[in-house]
Amino acid sequence: MRTKIHFLKGDITELAVDAIVNAANTDLALGSGVAGAIRRKGGPTIQEECDRIGPIGLGEAAVTTGGMLPALYVIHAASMSLGAKTTEQSLRESVRNSLNQAEERTFKSMALPAIGTGVAGFPVDACARIMIQEVLDHVKTRTSLERIYFVLFDEAALKVFQDTYKQLTQRAPA
């Protein structure tokens, strides 16, 4: 079965999927941005699980339950150290490891935000290129993922992700 990739404007914490991805720090401290929304809406259980798991290495990903969220699980993609910036390498590795965590658990659906573009200061256009390329590379192989959602907070980011997807998928084969 071919994986369907969707782009939505909205709140990732409202999606009923197997897993949502959290733009995390290596301490797994749910502070602001997507992580803060997950903490507020998912309840204290998620932070308690993060405290038992963390810290994790830069570029790694860890999984907790979804607490009171509609999503069953949260994959915490550590693209930065606490107070630091996301880099191209840490973003690429954290997305790859998030996809691998989903595969290990045979998830059928997952949703990703624009990791690192908030407090971590990573440019949205570079984020879109890296994240979409990682997803496209991943789904070329056998995958349990049937639906992958990129959930963007505003129209501008949504357009960047949609345009980047078109550019990456309409390239002529080499």
Image: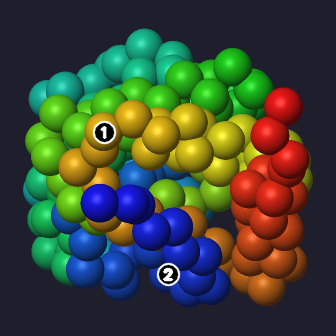
Q: Residue at x 79, y 51 (%)?
A: 168
Q: Is residue 41 above or below residue 148?
A: below
Question: Disc 1 designates what residue?
Answer: 142
Residue 53 visible within the image? yes
At which x and y percent is residue 134? 59, 37
Residue 166 placement: quadrant: bottom right
Which comes sooner in the sequence, label 2 or label 1? 2
Residue type of the residue flagged with mark 1 = Arg
At which x and y percent is residue 104? 17, 33
Question: For this rendering, which residue is in front, 98 or 145?
Answer: 145
Question: Disc 2 designates what residue?
Answer: 11
**SS at mark 2 in the image:** loop
Question: For this rendering, which residue is in front, 105 or 119?
Answer: 105
- Which residue of the protein is positioned furthest toward the top in this rendering? 57
Q: Nearer the viewer, mark 2 or mark 1?
A: 1
At which x and y percent is residue 164? 82, 59
Q: Residue at x 28, y 24 (%)?
A: 54
* Quadrant into which the N terminus falls: bottom left
Q: Using a 10 Å C-alpha cutoff, classify the residue at mark 2 as few (fewer than 14 neighbours), some (14 to 19) or many (20 or more).
A: some
**Residue 90 shown left or right of residue 85 in the figure:** left
**3D distance between C-alphas at marks 2 and 1:** 29 Å
The numbered dot on residue 27 is: none
**Residue 143 shown left or right of residue 163 in the figure:** left
Residue type of the residue flagged with mark 2 = Asp
Q: Using a 10 Å C-alpha cutoff, classify the residue at mark 1 as few (fewer than 14 neighbours), some (14 to 19) or many (20 or more).
A: few
- Which residue of the protein is positioned furthest toward the front in this rendering? 173
**SS at mark 1 in the image:** loop
Q: Residue at x 14, y 65 (%)?
A: 72
Q: Is residue 6 above or below residue 74?
A: below
Q: Is residue 71 above or below residue 130?
A: below
